[in-house]
Amino acid sequence: MKRHLLSAADLSRDDAELVLTTAAELRELADRPIKKLPALRGRTVVNLFFEDSTRTRISFEAAAKRLSADVINFAAKGSSLSKGESLKDTALTLEAMGADAVVVRHGASGAPHRLAHSGWVRSSVVNAGDGTHEHPTQALLDAFTMSRHLGAGKSGQSLDGRRVAIVGDVLHSRVARSNALLLHTLGAEVTLVAPPTLLPVGVETWPVETSYDLDGVIPKADAVMMLRVQRERMNGGFFPTAREYSRRYGLDGRRMATLQDHTIVMHPGPMVRGMEITADVADSDRSVIVEQVTNGVAVRMAVLYLLLGGSEPAVGGEE
Amino acid sequence: MPAHPHDTPSPGERVVLDERDISRALTRISHEILERNKGAADLVLLGIPSRGVPLARRIAERIAAVEGYDVPFGSLDVTMYRDDLRMKPARALLPTEIPPGGIDGRTVVLVDDVLFSGRTIRAALDALNDIGRPRAVQLAVLVDRGHRELPIRADFVGKNLPTSLVERVMVTLTGIDDTDAVTISATASEGGLA
């Protein structure tokens, strides 16, 4: 039985489209006087965050509350236990509290997978970002945002043949990996643009193109997604200077002028203005960065509803 | 949910309303709504997806033809308010479109194809509660097949259709299906509501 959302690869095209159409209905809720639905009344969602996060945790919390679930925020930061023990002990605590879903963010890649498959908990596990591995709900909200601006087809959701450039620190980015997998599932053509030092080993097995030349890629793109340079994960020298990185891989006003008229600029946040993106681009009409945050709540509502709303989940990976 | 392929009625199936019957029933319901409410002012028609929505649209068209007034109409999905939500896998949501004027202080006429247990309508009343406060709520259905499980009744009924619990009532409407028809079949074979 499908119970968890651990990787964007867990989602078939039908699953992904169901999440997007459900999110489209749930987004209308934001315009209503009472922003609440009863679907998860009596269910408990635990936000288990081992790593700092502002928007993802708040977004999941808002999503669960709008569906009438009870929300417990569990910040595990500062625990002195080693990671394996800590995760297990925490999981056993959650199980004792009767959590129906655990939304987990962890600095170690694979931690949500461990939690889901260890037998420690019976609840659904939703990966809210694990190390440099995956962040599937971010990919879903990015795809949702793209489909609202670029979508075609009978449901208005199709991204078939759309070109998406994902630019920057791909190596440390869980967002890039999840987006590459999901956008490929949805029929889009993804190009990763990064200096050779910031492309992960094995990227040739991903369903994407790669390029080192930003100026050659973005004039053809329908969406340009800028990634944050994750200096907190960098121990070595991946590029000579910040200034050189910005000149070669940053999106500034000059590069923005080469985009097609309909092309949107995205960023998963948090942004480092002046590094990967300049302020005039981030604040321009093309930028959908604030809308991405709004859409995040609707997409996470859709995921929680489809996993917990019925007798069994409607989307997600195999047990 | 399975589609409603109804070009070739199989044995044991009986057409109880054909295209013209449905048209006449809707015309009568439209007039009854106008009579009861002394005109169309302040009315809002909300169809319950999927087949309540084209019915609401058709009633709105008839009212417009009689009164020369465009009644606001929309749709109201009740999926998340159903009392059997936890008994099946999570279902896809259907569109909710509330007309721009909202429902506060207006008379809402809910429109559905078949009235059976009454549980869908209970869910719809709960859903309305989260959207606004109508002055009154009325219910129009194409077919009332009986077997109520809740204290709910329709204000406007196209046809009262006495059925047994094992029978199955199916409504097809152009726009969603190929034909306009209400059929009744002896067995509750395939899945499907109604």
Image (cartoon, coloured by chain):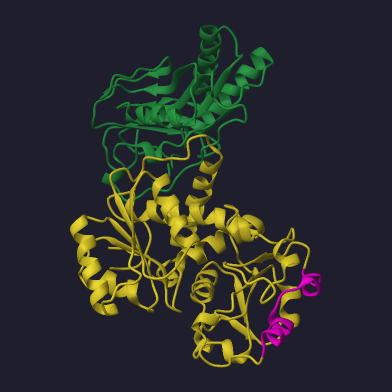
The answer to if A246 sits in the magenta stretch is: yes
**Where is B21 relative to A271, above or below?**
above
List x then y, in percent, for residue A278: 72, 71
> Which chain did the image draw in green?
B
Q: Is residue A46 visible?
A: yes
Of A167 and B24, nearer the camera is A167
**Number of numbered discs on residues:** 0
Of B70 and B175, nearer the camera is B70
Of A265 and B10, nearer the camera is A265
Quadrant of res A227: bottom right
Q: Which residues are magenta?
A: A241-259
**Where is A86 relative to A201, above or below?**
above
List x then y, in percent, for residue A10: 40, 69
> Which chain did the image draw in yellow?
A
**Where is A194 relative to B66, above or below?**
below
List x then y, in percent, for residue A25: 51, 46
The residue at the point 48 percent across, 75 percent down is A174
